[in-house]
Each structure stands twice: as structure tokens, then as C-alpha cells.
């Protein structure tokens, strides 16, 4: 397995924490965290922020801490995957990055039920064989814009309907 150095891990960590989900309301009334109160492990992961720690907002500090804890709990394989995603992210141009961040923000604005449905649908898609996934992509790409919109509306309607299960 490919070995990654600490600097790369730190860079990936920073990327992960910058896109991590954090509920700002939960940290709204908390005081800033003192650097000295952090665990040695967390300090090591976010060491590049030590000099400017006190000037960071509560939200940023908490995002860094949560991200560091998440990073520390990852397996080697998860860290490797995160490294690969980070490398892909760095290769994207700024317009594509902004587009993806915009989509992420739109997703975060959706109701929890809708987010769960989308996650479930994506999981089902990921569980398909690569050939079936590619066939679906190709089929969707070949639809006219009107047909795509029609399909999206139909899927939206289907998701809103209660599921009926046949019991034996």
C-alpha cells in the first residue's frame, strides 16, 4: 500500500474539515477553545494552526477539532481514499470547485428526509455493477432536456409516495 507523509495527511485533513458538516448553532454560545486544552493527538494533526489559533472563530476552531478527531479515527484505507479524493479536488479548476460547493450547499438546505432519500438512491446506484452504472449514465445523457426534466419530476413524485410492501 502506498505510504503517505504527514504533510499530505495534514493537507487532506484541512480539506476534509473545510467541507465537513457542522451545525453552527451548536457552537454559537461556546467560548473559543484554548490550544492548551486540546489533546496531543489533535494538536499534532492541526499543528499548522497553533500560531493563529486564538484569532480563529469558534466555528472554525470547532470544525478543525471535529475534522482532526474524524481523521484520527480513520483507518489507513480511509485515509488513503481521502488522500485520493483530495488529490482529485486539487486538480479541479476553480469554477468546478465552486459548482460542487454550491451543490453541496443546496443539498444541505434540503429537508433531512430528502437528503436520506438521495443518499439511499446513491447507495443503490453505487451497488450496481460498473456496467449497469455506465448504461444508466449513457441512457440519461442521451435523453433530451425535456425528457430528463420529465424523468426527474416522475422520480420526485415516486419518492413522495408511501411505500407499499407485499407481505407473504
Image (tube, grey):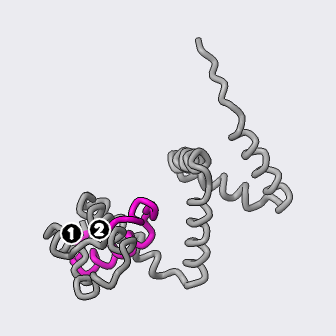
Q: Which residue is mark 2?
A: 65
Dot 1 and dot 2 residues touching (CB under 8 Å): yes
Q: Nearer the viewer, residue 107 or 78?
A: 107
Q: Residue at x 28, y 87 (%)?
A: 52
Residue 74 in view in this figure: yes
Vertically, is 126 above or below 7? above
Above or below: residue 28 compared with residue 132: below
Is residue 18 located in the magenta-colored stretch of the structure?
Answer: yes
- Of the residues under marks 1 and 2, which one precedes in the sequence? 1
**Quadrant housing the C terminus:** top right
- For label 1, the residue is 42
- Region in magenta: 2-30
Relative side of 68 to 149, left or right:
left
At x 22%, y 72%, the residue is 3
From the top left corner, tell me how far across and down residue 88 is, in percent. 45, 75
Comparing 48 with 59, the one in front is: 59
Q: CA distance from mark 1 to mark 2?
A: 7 Å
The prevailing secondary structure element of the residues shown in magenta is helix
Q: Of residues 13 and 91, which is closer to you in this image?
A: 13
Amino acid at each position: 500500500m502506498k505510504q503517505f507523509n504527514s504533510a499530505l495527511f495534514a493537507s487532506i485533513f484541512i480539506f476534509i474539515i473545510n467541507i465537513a458538516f457542522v451545525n453552527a448553532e451548536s457552537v454559537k454560545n461556546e467560548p473559543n477553545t484554548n490550544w492548551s486544552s486540546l489533546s496531543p493527538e489533535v494538536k499534532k494533526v492541526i499543528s499548522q494552526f497553533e500560531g493563529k489559533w486564538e484569532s480563529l472563530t469558534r466555528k472554525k476552531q470547532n470544525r478543525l477539532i471535529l475534522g482532526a478527531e474524524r481523521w484520527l479515527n480513520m483507518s489507513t484505507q480511509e485515509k488513503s481514499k481521502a488522500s485520493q479524493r483530495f488529490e482529485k479536488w486539487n486538480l479541479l479548476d476553480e469554477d468546478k470547485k465552486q459548482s460542487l460547493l454550491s451543490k453541496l450547499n443546496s443539498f444541505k438546505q434540503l429537508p433531512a428526509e430528502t437528503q436520506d432519500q438521495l443518499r439511499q438512491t446513491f447507495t443503490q446506484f453505487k451497488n450496481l455493477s460498473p456496467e449497469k452504472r455506465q448504461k444508466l449514465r449513457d441512457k440519461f445523457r442521451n435523453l433530451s432536456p425535456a425528457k430528463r426534466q420529465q424523468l426527474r419530476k416522475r422520480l420526485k413524485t415516486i419518492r413522495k409516495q408511501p411505500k407499499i410492501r407485499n407481505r407473504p
